[in-house]
Amino acid sequence: MDTRACIRVVVVDDSALVRGLLGEIINRQRDMQCVGVAADPLAARELIRAVNPDVITLDVEMPRMDGIDFLSRLMRLRPTPVVMVSTLTERGAEVTLRALELGAVDFVAKPRIGVAEGLQRLADDITDKIRVAARAQVRRLSALVPHDPAAKPVAGTGVAPMGRLSTEKLIFIGASTGGTEATKAVLTELPADSPAILITQHMPAGFTTSYAKRLDSLCQIRVREASDGERLLPGHAYIAPGGLHLSVERSGANYVARVRDGDPVNRHKPSVEVLFESAARVVGPNALAVMLTGMGADGAQAMRAMRDAGSYNICQDEASCVVFGMPREAVRLGAAHDVLPLPRIAAALIAQLKRTTGGTIHRL
């Protein structure tokens, strides 16, 4: 094994069992190596200085200093790609979302019982996320908005209502790695009278409930997990529940959400491909689509089908993506009308909606 070509990983976890298992999973891969383990952040700090890893896996809750405090300091002083190791609890979900806000690239949800067997089942997912993290663009925390849990955020301040728009319009958003924060950046800049928004973010069951609640507290629009058969209303955003596919259907004069189980598509459930394919088939020229940061190609072909059906499509640009995989593939297939930095996407959606007349998208 050529260690110079390997992704060098440090594992930080207070459980000796988890440290051993993660180290073993990492070392089984030809393209990565566990170069050190630490039982707490204080020990990790010295280890990281010594070995300068490419990626860190970090437990959320540890003694002496919790993972969030450590991550905050790390991203201010020594920005490094981090994959969080979380727990499938409401508290674990909330802390994990905070970690993503601070700059963690992604997370792995470990089971509360049967940890050894569970981590082995997740081995491919863990190592895939380490590979993505090694290529991700990480930014120094000082560039991010500080978190004050006591402050009630005022979302979209200064964003004027769009006025009377066709209720036929729907916005579709697909995202993966880095997408929780990218989606937040778009939604918080949309006014309360936006068309209904459907979102597929690659996220496991147990985390989307907390994610929807968090976004709902930050946005002028209402944000919730989608429920099967519910009518899609303006001023609302609907997030695909973790582990289930989201699509759109027509019911008389209304659009409704369809939430279903099924096989993974492009290895994902929920899948952006499923959502965007339904948009192309059901909504056509009344759809607007946004492809945000993410690894892989999920949704790219269906986004092209949306364009062919008359939708208006935006892809996030490479410079503002954590990972430019999914937008790159959509652009390569000719699916995008515009490729924009993240801070300009909401304004572009609003402008396009205001140019819309008579239910027909004005082509750019």
Image (cartoon, rainbow, N blue to C red):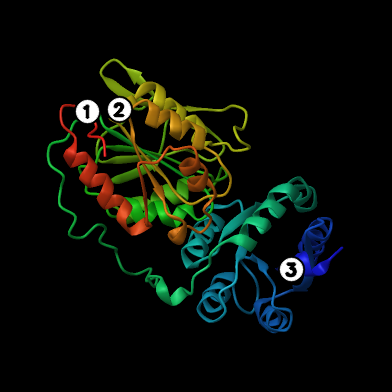
Residue that carries the numbered disc 1 in the rendered image: 360
Q: Quadrant of the N terminus?
A: bottom right
Q: Which class describes the residues within 10 Å of circle 2: few (<14), some (14-19), or many (20+)?
A: many
Given this view, does label 3 or label 2 mark the residue nearer the observer?
Answer: 2
First in sequence: mark 2 vs mark 1: 2
| Residue 228 seen in this snapshot | no
**Quadrant of the image occupied by residue 45:** bottom right
In terms of secondary structure, where does tag 2 sit?
Answer: helix
In terms of secondary structure, where does tag 3 sit?
Answer: strand
Tell me, yes or no, whether the two marked residues, 2 and 1, touch with CB atoms within 8 Å: yes
Residue appearing at x 57%, y 61% in the figure? 136
Q: Amino acid at mark 2?
A: Pro
Residue 186 coordinates in the image, percent (x, y):
34, 52
Label disc, if present, on residue 266 of the rendered structure = none
Q: What is the spatial separation of the Cα atoms under label 3 and label 2, in whole angstroms?
A: 47 Å
In terms of secondary structure, where does tag 1 sit?
Answer: loop
Q: Amino acid at mark 1?
A: Thr
Q: Is residue 91 left or right of residue 6?
A: left
| Residue 182 seen in this snapshot | yes
Q: Is residue 345 left or right of residue 260?
A: left
First in sequence: mark 3 vs mark 2: 3
First in sequence: mark 1 vs mark 3: 3
Q: Which class describes the residues within 10 Å of circle 3: few (<14), some (14-19), or many (20+)?
A: many
Q: Which class describes the residues within 10 Å of circle 1: few (<14), some (14-19), or many (20+)?
A: some
Tell me, yes or no, whether the two marked residues, 3 and 2, touch with CB atoms within 8 Å: no
Residue that carries the numbered disc 3 in the rendered image: 8
Residue 279 coordinates in the image, percent (x, y):
39, 28
Residue that carries the numbered disc 2 in the rendered image: 285
Q: What is the spatial separation of the Cα atoms under label 1 and label 3, in whole angstroms?
A: 52 Å
Q: In the rendered image of this protein, does residue 132 appear above or below residue 225? A: below
**Quadrant of the image occupied by residue 353:** top left
Given this view, does label 1 or label 3 mark the residue nearer the observer?
Answer: 1
